[in-house]
Image: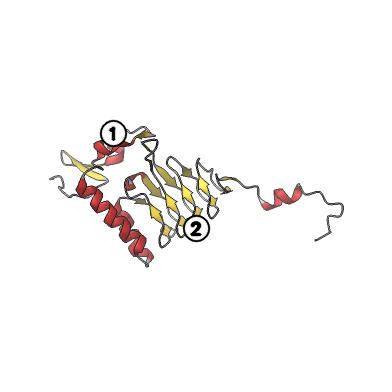
Amino acid sequence: MRCSRRPWPSTRRCCGGKVVNRMESTAETFPANRDEYARRHGSERVAVLLYRKLAGRLQRGLMWGRLRRLACRLLGVRLESAPGLRPPWIAFDAYLDDTFPELISIGAGAALGPRCIVLCHDDTARIVSPVAIGRGSFVGAGAIVLPGVTIGAGAVIGAGAVVTRSVPPGETWAGVPARRLEPAAARAEKIPCADPQHVL
């Protein structure tokens, strides 16, 4: 089996006739140095950069969800499929890091709101680190997910939040920087009230 000479990035490659996953075949430790990672994975090649920028622009401009998912896969983003769960939903104009898209994984049933941003690299610190968005989680409109963050299954990220650290499963986070919000019932118990039946 001959190895592909395609200019675009592939998450799979040939190794003596055996097809293996690129991310599994290279034991990366994150956060990794941005420049070294780019050299090892060919991310600095002009053809790769052009392909990723075009695929990223296509993904952000498509109105139909199925075509957006196809563009994401062409870009290199890992989208999970699972029986009984709908495919990941990515809103129009959501930005997924098109420089290191292979570091993004989105679980089945997850939803990314309009104009949310998912980043895997930091040019100031010169690092790259993967981002994982768990099954059934929701990222609100305009939220920003920074490198190295894992959003647990069923978690909710409020609109406009800046997520700087990982979010446990099932929790709701919001704000800048994002922090955990207490459930409404827990907040209500802390409000002093002489008459529990009193409603303002």
Q: Which residue is drawn at 28% across and 56% down?
A: 55
Q: Report the amino acid beneath label 2.
A: Ala
Amino acid at dot 1: Glu
Residue 11, position as x, y percentages in the image: 27, 46
The residue labelled by disc 2 is: 141
- The single residue placed furthest to the right in the displayed view is 194
Q: Identify the residue shown where x is 27% and y is 36%.
A: 25
Q: Which of the 4 image quadrants contains residue 18?
A: top left
Residue that extends furthest to the left in the rendered view of this protein = 2
- Look at the image and tell me in which quarter the C terminus lies: bottom right
In percent of width and height, residue 113 lies at 47, 58
Picture quarter with the N terminus: top left
Checking the image for residue 148, the label placed there is none
Total of numbered circles in the picture?
A: 2
Residue pointed to by mark 1: 36
Give the x, y percent position of residue 148.
Answer: 43, 40
Give residue 19's position: percent from left, percent from top.
22, 43
- Asked which secondary structure carries label 2, the reply is loop
Helix, strand or loop at label 1? It is helix
**What residue sits 38% from the left and 64% below the top?**
65
